[in-house]
């Protein structure tokens, strides 16, 4: 499939499946248990129905939004994903260039294969945010916070729904088939001598990282950086209230793409409760299951300031590097703009909660496909 033929996120997914080696596809596609949460993230969007407003001037649409004080041309940003060199030699550099081309944000993972400085240098006009792990050594955390500020990053994201790290991938690549060089310069000051994936390497990660972080760790980060702090992985309204009480600037409603705990709610279903709990004291975002511009519109109507994508960005990266990432973002932008036109919204602030109702409003409890032969 050529770069020119991408017309949907489904196209990008198919192209990535065709291009990626099995171990890379397995790692990016991994879900917990039987994948209930992963599937529900996607299916849940279909349970919400749009109520269009007509006879409005939508001849020109503005998809721009302000996130953490920075203007994005589209309310779709790229969430933190690691091991991107599995997808493309350009890895995080290519993803950053694709995001910058669309003037939207990218959260650089601690598991990135390029340093935060390299990413900022290759995309100097980009909107850079950094996802930081919790470490036992707070001096290490302080060095990373300072590095992020010096490199021009404008927010710190903390993932709070991963109390334990697997430190492994599902299917091991064949010996010697890891892309080279494969490194994690935002975790280690000096790369360890152990082979990636070895027992010694995993033990070093466990000895370095602080698993099962607490609110005290969040408060420490808040007190040791001048940058806004966003918590990623919140599904509880009570946790959201506790976060804003501690001065957190943003809440990213996320279930880690169904990779951590199966059986938790779809993020779009939880979103309204989180928005109410926050009460405007922090910005609220969403990830998980976003596959169309209509999905984006529904999330915005239910209170998200913007959405983040993970796997779709990786699919675009695998498809065609920076251009593939840009294509994925452009598809979602075009679909969002069209959905806005069809629902009477000329700008993002026109997207209101009254635009969306849950299917149960109409007494619909399940949607079952009916074969065309039945008509």
Image (cartoon, grey):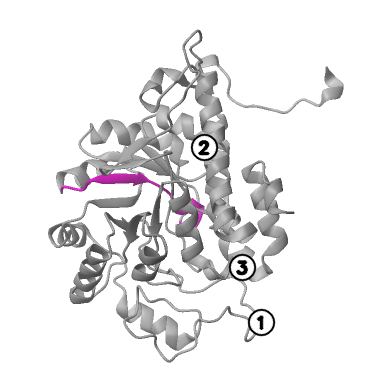
* Residue 152, visible in the rendered structure: yes
If you read the primary sequence from the N terminus, does the residue marked by circle 1 or circle 3 appear first? 3
Q: Is residue 255 magenta?
A: yes
Q: Nearer the viewer, mark 2 or mark 1?
A: 2
**In the visual, does 272 lie left or right of 54?**
left
Q: Is residue 108 above or below residue 202?
A: above
The N terminus sits in image quarter:
bottom right
Please name the residue shown 47% across and 20% down the image.
Answer: 357
Residue highlighted by disc 2: 333
Residue extending farthest bottom: 193
Q: Is residue 316 above or below residue 140?
A: above
**In the visual, does 244 lie left or right of 316?**
left
Magenta segment boundaries in residue numbering: 247-260
The C terminus sits in image quarter:
top right
Please name the residue shown 26% across and 54% down the image.
Answer: 154
Along the line of sight, the residue nearer the viewer: 156 or 196: 156
Number of residues whose C-alpha sits closer than 10 Å to that of mark 1, classed few (under 14), some (14–19) or many (20 or more): few
Residue highlighted by disc 3: 24
If you read the primary sequence from the N terminus, does the residue marked by circle 3 or circle 2 appear first? 3
Along the line of sight, the residue nearer the viewer: 21 or 341: 341
Q: Position of residue 321 (x, y in %)?
A: 58, 60
Q: Position of residue 138 (x, y in %)?
A: 19, 73
Q: Secondary structure at mark 3?
A: helix
């Amino acid at each position: 499939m050529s770069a020119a033929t991408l017309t949907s996120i489904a196209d990008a997914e198919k192209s990535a499946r065709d291009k990626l080696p099995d171990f890379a596809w397995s790692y990016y596609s991994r879900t917990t248990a039987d994948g209930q949460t992963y599937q529900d993230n996607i299916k849940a969007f279909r349970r919400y129905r749009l109520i269009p407003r007509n006879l409005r001037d939508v001849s020109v649409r503005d998809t721009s939004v302000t996130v953490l004080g920075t203007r994005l041309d589209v309310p779709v940003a790229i969430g933190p994903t690691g091991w991107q060199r599995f997808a493309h030699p350009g890895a995080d550099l290519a993803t950053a260039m694709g995001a910058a081309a669309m003037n939207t944000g990218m959260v650089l993972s601690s598991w990135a294969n390029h340093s935060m400085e390299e990413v900022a240098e290759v995309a100097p006009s980009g909107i850079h945010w950094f996802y930081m792990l919790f470490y036992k050594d707070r001096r290490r955390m302080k060095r990373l916070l300072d590095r992020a500020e010096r490199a021009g990053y404008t927010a710190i994201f903390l993932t709070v729904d991963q109390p334990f790290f697997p430190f492994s991938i599902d299917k091991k690549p064949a010996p010697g088939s890891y892309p080279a060089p494969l490194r994690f310069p935002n975790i280690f000051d000096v790369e360890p001598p152990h082979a990636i994936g070895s027992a010694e390497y995993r033990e070093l990660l466990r000895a370095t990282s602080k698993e099962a972080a607490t609110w005290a760790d969040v408060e420490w980060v808040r007190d040791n950086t001048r940058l806004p702090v966003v918590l990623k992985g919140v599904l509880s309204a009570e946790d959201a209230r506790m976060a804003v009480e501690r001065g957190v600037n943003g809440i990213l409603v996320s279930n880690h793409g169904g990779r951590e705990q199966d059986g938790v709610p779809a993020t779009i279903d939880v979103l309204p409760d989180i928005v109410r709990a926050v009460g405007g004291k922090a910005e609220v975002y969403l990830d998980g299951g976003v596959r169309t511009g209509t999905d984006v519109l529904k999330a915005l109507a239910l209170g998200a300031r913007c959405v983040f994508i993970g796997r779709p960005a990786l699919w675009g990266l695998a498809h065609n590097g920076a251009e593939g990432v840009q294509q994925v973002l452009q598809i979602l932008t075009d679909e969002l703009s069209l959905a806005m036109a069809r629902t009477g919204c000329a700008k993002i602030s026109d997207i209101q909660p009254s635009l969306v109702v849950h299917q149960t409003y109409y007494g619909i409890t399940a949607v079952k496909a009916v074969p065309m032969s039945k008509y």
